[in-house]
Image (cartoon, helix red, strand yellow):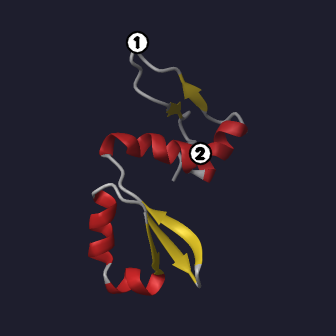
Amino acid sequence: MRLVSVRELKAKPSEFLRLAVQGELVIIATRGKPTAVLRAIAEEELEDYILENSPRIRRLVSEGRVREAHPVGAGGLGQTVEVPAGNAPR
């Protein structure tokens, strides 16, 4: 785990991106306080990450405007969301 300031990140973005891709967590601090995390993400994780962390998707699910679909097959395909026509997130 590496703690870096915004100034350091701006000076050497490629270095910290490389560390994240290699599996190290890079914690970004603003005025000495942790404010963000830079970490690697695999392409197959992206959809699940967006669904779990998007405030708009979460709101649509809580309002019943979209619903979570059931995983397909024994292994499942992960969490997916079915969006009715006209309600697709932007």
Tell me, for residue 57, which label it has, or none.
Answer: 2
Kind of element beneath mark 1: loop
Say above or below: 22 vs 47: below
Can you identify the residue that label 1 sits on?
74
Task: From the image, state whether disc 2 or disc 1 is nearer to you.
Answer: 1
Q: Residues within 10 Å of mark 1 (few under 14, many from 20)?
A: few
Three-letter amino acid code at the position of disc 2: Ile
The first of marks 2 and 1 along the sequence is 2
> Toward the viewer: 86 or 10?
10
Say above or below: 61 vs 74: below
37 relative to 42 in the view: left or right: right
Q: Position of residue 18 (x, y in %)?
A: 26, 66
Q: Name the residue at 40% across, 12% down.
A: 74
**Residue reaching furthest to the front:** 1
Q: Position of residue 14 (x, y in %)?
A: 27, 74
Say above or below: 38 vs 48: below
